[in-house]
Amino acid sequence: MIKASFLYDSQGFFTSYEISGHDASAKNGHNIICAAVSALALTFTQSLIEILKLPLSGKIEKGFISLSLPLEARKISKEVDLLLKSLMLGLRSINKQYGNVIQIIERN
């Protein structure tokens, strides 16, 4: 199962995310669910870096992404939230289409 965790601070600001795991419905290289989640996660990450100019910290490896946003992200929290909502919409759409293959966790 794919696990997507999103962390918020005590004031509700989005601070970090981690997406890991694989969907076992097809072998590696042929799995459209993993490919879709990877595309969403990488587009979200690149949007934070390239469009919003946020210097993220963490790591990206095959099947794993764990990144934290800098404190300066609070100044543009509306833009960050819009990108986050887009990512969540995509993840939830995959779950709706393919039957809860992604565990989405949001916590403070």
Image: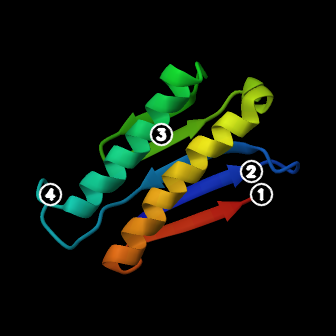
| Label drawn at residue 44 | 3
Of the numbered discs 2 and 3, the one sitting upstream in the chain is 2
Identity, as a three-letter code, of the amino acid under mark 1? Asn
Residue shown at 53% from the left, 23% from the top: 51
Identity, as a three-letter code, of the amino acid under mark 3? Phe
Of the numbered discs 1 and 2, the one sitting upstream in the chain is 2
Q: Which residue is mark 1?
A: 108
SS for tag 1? loop
Q: Position of residue 73 (x, y in %)?
A: 72, 29
Identity, as a three-letter code, of the amino acid under mark 2? Tyr
The answer to whether mark 3 and mark 1 are in CB contact below 8 A is: no
Of the numbered discs 3 and 1, the one sitting upstream in the chain is 3
Q: Residues within 10 Å of mark 4 (few under 14, many from 20)?
A: few
Identity, as a three-letter code, of the amino acid under mark 4? Asn
Q: Coloring scheme of the render?
A: rainbow
The answer to whether mark 1 and mark 2 are in CB contact below 8 A is: yes
Residue 102 occupies which quadrant of the picture? bottom left
Residue shown at 41% from the left, 72% from the top: 95
Of the numbered discs 4 and 1, the one sitting upstream in the chain is 4
Q: Nearer the viewer, mark 4 or mark 2?
A: 2
Q: Position of residue 26 (x, y in %)?
A: 15, 69
Q: Position of residue 4 (x, y in %)?
A: 50, 59
Q: Nearer the viewer, mark 3 or mark 1?
A: 3
Residue 1 in view here: no
- Asked if residue 69 is positioned above or below residue 91 in the image, the reply reads above
* Residue furthest right as drawn: 11
Residue 77 falls left or right of residue 36: right
